[in-house]
Image (cartoon, grey):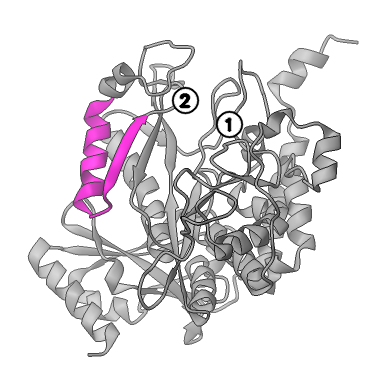
Amino acid sequence: MNIMIKETSLLEAAIAEKKIEFLLASYVDMHGVSKGKIVPVDHADQMLHGSELFTGAALEGVPQSVHDDEVAARPDPSSVTVLPWRTNVAWLASDLWLGGKPFSACSRGILKRQTKAAADLGYKFNLGMEAEFYVLRRDAGGNAEHVTKRQLSKPCYDIGAALDNFDWLSELVTAMNGLGWDVYSFDQEDGQGQFEIDFQYAEAVTMSDRYVFLRMMANQIARKHGCFASFMPKPYANRSGSGAHFNMSLADLATGKNLFADNADPRGCGLSTLGYHFIAGVIAHLPAICAVISPTVNSYKRLVKQGSMSGFTWAPIFACYGNNNRTNAVRIPGGGGRIELRSADSSCNPYLGAAMVLAAGLEGVRAAADPGEPNRANMYKATNEELERKGIRQLPHTLGEALDAFEADPLSEQVFGPEMKASWLEYKRDEWLSYMAHVSEWETKRYLEFF
C-alpha cells in the first residue's frame, strides 16, 4: 500500500475513534514556535494536499517578501497528535511547500534533508532531548514569581517542591505518557521553580515534533493551574539555566541496532569508533552550531563557567568532549552507546539544531575523524596553557561571536541553504545589535552617578 494512503487511513481512523472535530496544520517559524491554521475535519482531505496557505513575510525569519507567493502547509498524517487538554482537536506537524515542491527554508524540511543524507549512508539518527524549564505565576502586580515558596540554596531534586507543583506537573506527565512518549523521570531541577522531564528518545524528526509540541503543551496545562512555563534559557543570574541537551546515536537503518555502542571500547567510554568519528565532526563545527542550538542573546548568560552563583554553572564553555563528565560540551554518559551535546538550550529550534549537529557528525564519519582522547578532568579548572596544548577552543561568549562563527563556517549554508542562512543571520544580527543598543538597569545603577 502507498505509504501516504496508509498514513491517511490511520489519520481518518484516529479522527473517527477520538471524535476529532478540528485539525491544526502546524509548522514552525525560525524560533521553533508552532504556527498554523485550524481546519474543520470536513476539510481534512484538502488540508492534507496543501490547501492551507501562509504569507511567509508575516513570519519571523522566513526569507520571503510581501510580493512572493504563499507557502503551503502539507501535514504529515503519521504525526497526528490529539491535544490532551482539548480532545476534539488534533495537531499535525507539517512541511512547507512553495510552487509545488518543498520550501527550502522550512525548518522541518531542513532536518529531513539531513536525515536523508544519513539514510543514504545506512543510518537512522536517534535523538533524545531533556526538557528543562521554569514554571512561574504572576502576582497581583503582574510580576513573575516562583511557584513554590520553599527557599533552598540547593533546591535540586527537592521532593517538597515537586509535590507543591504536583497538580500541573502530574497532569503534564500523564498527558505525555498518554501520547506514548514514555516519561521515565521528572524532578525539581537546580533552579528554584525549575523542572526537568526526561522521556524516551525517537527518530530525530519525530523528537523535534514532540519537543515543539511539548513547549506548547506545557504552557497550555500550566495556565490551567494559574501558572506559565518559561523556556527562556537563563531567567535568573543566580540560578541554573535551562538546557535541552541533545542525546544522540546512529542506528542501523535496516535493523535498528545502535551503532554507537561498543562494550570493548579501548577508551573505556562504551562508544564505538563510529561514535568517535561523529564527535570529531561535531566538535569541529561547534562554534557555528552554537548559533543555532543557543540562539538567543540570553543563551550566552547560561554558557559561563561561574556567574552570580555560588558554584559552577554546569553549562559547557569549551569545545571538547569527555567521558561521563559534565564539564565537557560533548559528554559520553555512563554506559556509553550515545553522546550528549550539553550546549543546546530550551529556546532552540530543534529541527535546525538537530540538522546542524547531524550534518557535522556525518562529516566526521565520512572523514573517519578522530577527536583524540576523552577529557576526564574538571575542564572548568583547566589553565589556558592546558587548553592550548590540547587544541581546545572556548565556545562563543556572545550571540554576536556565535553568528560570526556561523557565517564563516561552510556547513551553515550546506545545511540551511543560502536563503535561510542569509535570513537567519539578518534576523539574529538585528537581535544582537538591538541588545547592544539597550541600556540596562545594571548599567544605570553602576554608571549614572559613578563619575
Residue drawn at x 65%, y 36% is 303
Residue 63 visible, this angle:
no
State the mark number for residue 314. Answer: 1
Does residue 354 appear to the left or right of 281 in the view shown? Answer: left
What amino acid is found at the position of numbered circle 1 in the picture? Trp
How many numbered callouts?
2
Secondary structure beneath dot 2 equals loop
Residue 292 visible, this angle:
yes
Does residue 160 appear to the left or right of 297 in the view shown? Answer: left
Image height check: is 257 above or below 186?
below
Mark 1 to mark 2 CA distance (whole Å):
10 Å
Residue drawn at x 52%, y 70% is 106
Which segment did they paint magenta? Answer: 165-187
For the residues labelled 1 and 2, say whether their Cβ atoms are less than 8 Å apart: yes
Q: Quadrant of the N terminus?
A: bottom left
Residue that badge 2 annotates:
190
What amino acid is found at the position of numbered circle 2 in the picture? Asp
- N-term mark: 1 or 2: 2
Image height check: is 364 above or below 88?
below
Relative to the observer, which residue lies in front, 418 or 240?
240
- Return the x and y of residue 79 as percentages of the image width and height: 30, 66
